[in-house]
Amino acid sequence: MIRRTVRDIRRRNRSDVLQCTYAAGHPVNRQQIAAATGLSTATVATLTGELLAAGVLHEVGQEDSRGGRPRARLSVNGARGLLIGTDVSEDFVHIALFDLAMRVRGTFERPLDPGGSSPLDVVELVALGVDEVLRDSGADRERVLGIGVSVPGLVEKEHGVSLLSVYGHWENVPLKALLAERLGFPLYLDNPLKASTVAELWFGAGRGVDNLVVVTLRTGVGVGMALDGALYRGVTNCAGEWGHTGLVRKGRGCRCGRLGCVEAYVSAPGILQTLREADPHSPLPALEDQRAAIAGLAEAVRRGEPAAVQALEDTGDHLGAAVSTLINTLNPRVLVLGDWTAQRLGEPLLDATRAAAARYALAQPFNAVSMQLCRLPHNPVSMGAAAFALEGFLADLASGAGRAGRGGARPVRG
Amino acid sequence: MIRRTVRDIRRRNRSDVLQCTYAAGHPVNRQQIAAATGLSTATVATLTGELLAAGVLHEVGQEDSRGGRPRARLSVNGARGLLIGTDVSEDFVHIALFDLAMRVRGTFERPLDPGGSSPLDVVELVALGVDEVLRDSGADRERVLGIGVSVPGLVEKEHGVSLLSVYGHWENVPLKALLAERLGFPLYLDNPLKASTVAELWFGAGRGVDNLVVVTLRTGVGVGMALDGALYRGVTNCAGEWGHTGLVRKGRGCRCGRLGCVEAYVSAPGILQTLREADPHSPLPALEDQRAAIAGLAEAVRRGEPAAVQALEDTGDHLGAAVSTLINTLNPRVLVLGDWTAQRLGEPLLDATRAAAARYALAQPFNAVSMQLCRLPHNPVSMGAAAFALEGFLADLASGAGRAGRGGARPVRG
Ligand SMILES: [Zn+2]
Ligand SMILES: [Zn+2]
């Protein structure tokens, strides 16, 4: 059983103070933090004091308070250290280097041979990318506070093992140990569903939201959930495999071997198959670069090409039916359509999905949910992976372990 | 945003101590409580002290501790007061009177005209039943600590309004105010999905389980969730409407007006329709009493009648596909098939559902979940409704309000 302690509340409150400082986008005073978080001014004073002492926050001037004592304006101290977020997708590796204020210092991206990469290939490519991004941005390796890595599939947190069995070719790979040894940073491993959700919680549509659902649409499909304010993992950290739940009984074959999965219809390959059904002569589904193919579909929709519009409408219908299961069952406040497939198809996909969900979902939970596109400024998975590293750093700060102590040992955790 | 406080932790710990005392089924000492809950012996000493002072626990003798100080054996003090649980189903009203140790002191049951009862009819029937069950058991009205009432559909907690719009005939009924005024007890209103889940958390398969899903199969269908140890409600308290999510696209018509809902296949009427499809001459689907019809189907399955066996297999296939969505998405530890339809069909339904889920769900979350029949000794909805009243009483105990203070005012809460 999960037992919450006073220490958990402290950790949660500290995260809330910091999230609210990120969210403001400009320096804030302690009174504003108290108002935004609902914490008492005394608690805010204690927590900001700790974060100032640790160098995570810094004072950036003062403001008049109409005759009273001048109020210190606080912001996240970007210079305190660096965070790396890594998105090992099925068809590319994306790495982003952030300062602690979440300003991008550099990025790296390289295509991956779909289905053709061994775990060691991936470890080497990540190590190469990290070296390159640090070198290109002139950053000091010693100032990296931690790295988060997202890999597709099921990541068992307890044993640090990556179970990518959905994809067949990797099973029980000790990816965390391999990466940690090669990189030498505190390392946090999870999957894109959870990373995207944590990115929205820290920096996006999930800030201050008690029940959030983030739908990831890329080569694979799944969902991340933050329920009653905290990331929901399930008992073996594999919650969110909604992509392989049934949408059409005895429908399209899915790469998991089942029939009619959600993923077979609303993943990038699924959407391209819908386009192929609408227009067998479309050149887009045959493109090797799926992101270019989806961008081409979005462009054809803008031009009003009938087959493209039909494919988009059909996709909205599939996705609307599929998210209605989430809306009815979880009654969330916010549902984000995220990742590159949704970002490229944009508002037309959102509109078609919302219209379909209005038909499929019950009125009460549908009226309670705000359906949105992801508005994060960078790859949400890399941002979320970096947020895992940030959370680890903050936990270390509280216990005095790891790099939080400025120059301590470098344990592997997560 | 949900903000957890030190007071929440105290309340949770107090519930854990009491749940563990109920669960033991026999008197327990403080060391056993500490071991079962994971709380420190100091915390257990404080909490049991409070519960003893409030008369909720009492000492029932001592035991030797091999030369040490004799240890007090504690149990719940049934004589401290009474709880009433009321299940307003679509086709019957069931009321159970419990002492605080959850021993049944009396029950009441009366059929309801499906679709034909007005809110005031229901209020009067509940009031009549409460009077009858108190009178028949010789119980003193003044000793009732609270009453929980479950009604089908969507219950908006904040405004105390029952939205039964799924069923068409009731909308925006201020049922809570009507019942509270008529009955004069502290009153807690919610729906059968949440009541069943709270019953499993307090007295059944959910004790000590971090992620629990309870599927309710009766005239209507839905799901209750206790995630990371707490009942999950969603943002407007209408989480769990999984019964009206799509199972078969363009499938059977559902009474909500949509096509192919889970409920259209695995509710009692849905199962009887499946039987009718397997054997158009079966007399069971035409019975007015659905509970008798489902009992008849269970009997026919035991006798090995081919159409009945076929209907049961088909139902297991439908239900296995439908619960796989919950298993993949929520990755629960325990999934209970509950309520009278599941109880009557029993092990054969559980086996057929488990076999189908093994095909439809992903291996990792399927292997992590224990699928079980509800084993609660009484109507789970009435037990859960009484548990809501118990939780309210415990909350009042902490704040000194209501009947917890022995003879205080009788506020309406929930
Ligand atoms: Zn699949
Ligand atoms: Zn329906």
Image (tube, coloured by chain):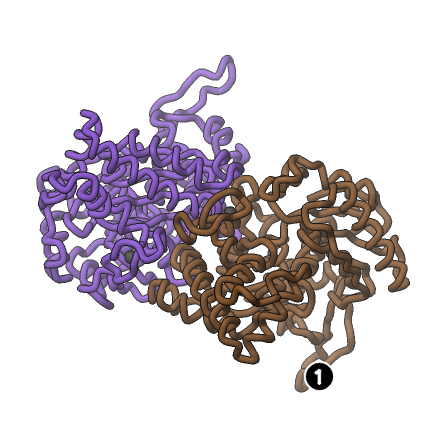
Chain colours: A purple, B brown
Q: Left or right: where does residue B218 sit relative to residue A334?
A: right
In the image, residue B76 sits, relative to residue B89, either above or below, namely below
- Residue A110 spot, x, y in % from top left: 10, 46
Residue toward you, A191 or B260: B260
| Visible residue check, residue B42 | no
Q: Is residue A364 above or below residue B131?
A: above
B270 to the left or right of A293: right
Q: Is residue A145 visible?
A: yes
Of A304 and A104, nearer the camera is A304
Q: Which residue is mark 1?
A: B64
Compare residues A209 and B96 and report the one nearer the observer.
B96
Quadrant in which the C terminus of chain A is drawn = bottom left
Residues packed near mark 1 inside 10 Å, few (<14), some (14 to 19) or many (20 plus):
few
x 30%, y 45%: residue: A216
Residue at the front extreme of this rendering: B281
Q: Position of residue A240 (x, y in %)?
A: 37, 53
Instruction: Identify which amino acid the numbered label 1 is placed on.
Output: Asp
